[in-house]
Each structure stands twice: as C-alpha cells, then as structure tokens.
Image (cartoon, grey):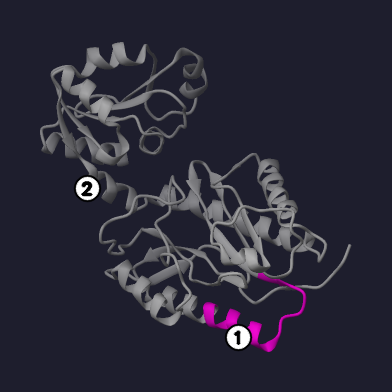
C-alpha cells in the first residue's frame, strides 16, 4: 500500500525514480533489513532492491520487492542515468548526490511526502507495533521478578538483552538501566553499580521491523513520602499529556505543557515511533489518526535522582490508545538474594 502511494506521488510529480540508500527507508518500503545495497522505486514498474550476491539469497524470501544481485554502482548507473530521481535529503550523502549528478540525473527532494507517509501507520504496521509493545510488557514483568537489592544495572541490562534474544528478536536500542544518582543522566550507560533508590528501566524490541520503547521507574528500597510525591508528580504530568494527545494537537504544545509542570525535564516529551525507535518527525508534528508516538516526561536532579515514565501511544479518532500496558504504580523492590 505504501509503495503504491509512493508510486502515485512519483507519477503525479513526473519523477522517474525514488532512490533509497538509507537503511531505514529501504527497510520501510522493501520489508527487509540489509547492510549494503539500495532500493529503486520506479514510477511505473516494479520496485527493485540492488544487493550484493551474498545477501540476495536471504532477502529474496522476505522482500516485498524484486531482489537483484548487483554490482551496486554499475547497475544503479545503468538504471538511473539521465533520469529524474527523488531522494530524501537528510538520508543520502553529498557524495552520492554528486555521483547521481555526474550521471546526468536530475535530483529532487521528496522529504515531505515520505515523512507524511511514514508518520501515519497502516493497520498492518499498527499490528506489528502492538505486538512489539506486548512483548515489551512481558519482558518488563520478568525484569521485576528478578530485581533485588543486590542486582547491578549491568545485570538488569544483560537480562533484558537475553530475554529479547530468547524471543528471537533484537532490541530497538541498547537498554538503559540507571539507578540512584545515575538516573539523573537520561541516556546513562549501565554499570556494575548496585541498584538503589529510583531506578530507570528503558528498553524496547523490534518486531517484524517495528519498534517499541517503554520506560518504567522502580524504587529499590523503601521510598520516603517525599520520594513518593516526586514520582506521583511525574506520573500526573504523564497522564495529563496522554489526555492531550489527540487528532489536530501540535506535539510542541504537549512538550511545552510538560516543561511548565516539570522544571527538571531536560528532554522532549516524546517522539514518533515506527521502523526506527526515534522515527521521522514532522516540523511541526501535528498529531493525526494512525500516528504512533511516545509520551515520556521525566524529572532529573543532577547527582541525586532521576524519574522517567514512558508509554507508546496510537492516535485514534477519539484520542490516544496506550499500547504499553505495564503498571505505572511505583514498584518497590526490597528483597535480597
């Protein structure tokens, strides 16, 4: 369906080909991942994936396009020379654009159309994201069962990676486990530090090319009343932001609201979600039915603590459906091995 939409656009704009060398776009349209190669989408004929011979056999079974063993630059030149070629400007290098121009190609940007196409998900794409979220919830439950006062950040991160691997999947990014003062660093790299106090667990999986991304904050030990309130404040803002996520809403307005409520929020309120965990982002991003986004407010006090709560949302006609179902009550871990 998305390929057909792209080809109609190319026909309407009198563009001969769309060329995708960036892995995310090529995967999005072809349905397969690869390290070297390119996807050519002609306006009026079957799309073609040019790929080295050692990769072709594997990809032929799964791709939704024709796969051809290729000498990449020679074959590409023979196909696109002298033609009008559409590219996504921030996903192609200057050297490749120069090469296309040397082949007498007229190069035009198709960024806006491709961004709109990726932002709004089909029913099939939504199914894959739902499945990714369901598996993420399942893994988080297992994480909670293994946590103790003697567990380290690195042990939790490795446990998550092993859980994902046992499902035959890949992580959508390297899991973040940050405890105590380390939790004040939003993208902290896990260490051998033992868990204590507020502990952020942030991870996701890739299911049939589509990503999930969920964060929960647990407390290792017994929280004080003040710490319970700090957590409750972040959760309250998250729930209010979710209630604001609806068709026609400017995502920047939700971000502004969150930062007014949480002075220690140091990052965006969220991002779009799809074949990349931080998927394409409209500017401005006006929410529409079928979009998938995250809502992830946080509060970070350097050298002291960090709290973040993140869910994946599907924008519907009536508002936002939360796809990640793990509890957001403050889970307290107070057990030893």
| Residue 64 in sight in this render | yes
Quadrant where the N terminus is found in the figure: top left
Compared across the picture, whether 167 is left or right of 267 comes to: right
Question: Given this view, does label 2 or label 1 mark the residue nearer the observer?
Answer: 1
As rendered, which of 268 and 7 lies closer to the eye? 268
As rendered, which of 81 and 10 lies closer to the eye? 81
Give the residue displayed 27% in from the left and 64% down from the top.
286
The answer to whether marks 2 and 1 mark residues whose Cβ atoms lie closer than 8 Å is no
Q: Is residue 52 magenta?
A: no
Which residue has dot 2 on it?
Answer: 112
Where does the image place residue 177, in percent across and percent down from the top left? 65, 58
Q: Is residue 220 magenta?
A: yes
**Within 10 Å of the Cα at label 2, are there few (<14), some (14-19), or many (20+) other Cα atoms?**
few
Chain part drawn in magenta? 218-234
How far, Cα to Cα, is label 2 from label 1? Answer: 43 Å
Q: Secondary structure at mark 2?
A: helix
Where does the image place residue 297, in percent across and percent down from the top left? 48, 71
As rendered, which of 137 and 81 lies closer to the eye? 81
- Residue 139 has which mark? none
Compared across the picture, whether 274 is left or right of 325 comes to: left
| Residue 41 in sight in this render | no
Q: Residue furthest bottom?
A: 225
Where does the image place residue 194, in percent across and percent down from the top left? 77, 61
- Residue 229 has which mark? 1
Q: Secondary structure at mark 1?
A: helix
Quadrant where the C terminus is found in the figure: bottom right
Compared across the picture, whether 282 is left or right of 26 comes to: left
**Within 10 Å of the Cα at label 1, are there few (<14), some (14-19), or many (20+) other Cα atoms?**
few
Give the residue displayed 36% in from the left and 38% down from the top.
25
């Amino acid at each position: 369906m998305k390929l057909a939409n792209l080809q109609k656009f190319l026909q309407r704009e009198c563009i001969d080909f769309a060329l995708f060398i960036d892995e995310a776009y090529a995967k999005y349209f072809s349905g397969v991942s690869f390290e070297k190669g390119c996807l050519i989408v002609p306006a009026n004929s079957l799309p073609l994936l040019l790929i080295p011979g050692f990769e072709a056999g594997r990809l032929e079974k799964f791709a939704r396009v024709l796969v051809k063993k290729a000498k990449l630059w020679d074959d590409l030149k023979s196909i696109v020379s002298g033609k009008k070629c559409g590219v996504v400007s921030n996903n192609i290098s200057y050297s490749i654009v120069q090469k296309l121009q040397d082949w007498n190609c007229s190069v035009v940007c198709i960024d806006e159309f491709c961004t709109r196409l990726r932002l709004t998900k089909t029913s099939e794409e939504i199914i894959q994201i739902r499945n990714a979220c369901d598996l993420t919830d399942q893994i988080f439950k297992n994480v909670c069962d293994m946590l103790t006062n003697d567990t380290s950040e690195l042990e939790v991160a490795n446990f998550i990676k092993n859980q994902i691997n046992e499902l035959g999947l890949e992580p959508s990014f390297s899991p973040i486990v940050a405890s105590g003062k380390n939790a004040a660093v939003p993208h902290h790299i896990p260490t051998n530090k033992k868990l204590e106090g507020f502990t952020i667990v942030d991870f996701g999986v890739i299911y049939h090319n589509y990503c999930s991304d969920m964060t929960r904050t647990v407390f290792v030990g017994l929280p004080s009343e003040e710490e319970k309130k700090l957590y409750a404040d972040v959760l309250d803002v998250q729930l209010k932001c979710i209630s604001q996520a609806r068709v026609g809403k400017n995502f920047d307005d939700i971000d502004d609201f969150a930062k007014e409520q949480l002075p220690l929020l140091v990052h965006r309120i969220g991002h779009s979600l799809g074949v990349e965990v931080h998927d394409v982002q409209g500017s401005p991003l006006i929410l529409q039915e079928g979009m998938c986004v995250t809502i992830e407010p946080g509060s970070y006090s350097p050298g002291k603590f960090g709290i973040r709560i993140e869910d994946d949302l599907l924008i519907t006609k009536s508002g936002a459906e939360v796809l990640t179902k793990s509890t957001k009550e403050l889970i307290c871990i107070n057990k030893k091995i």
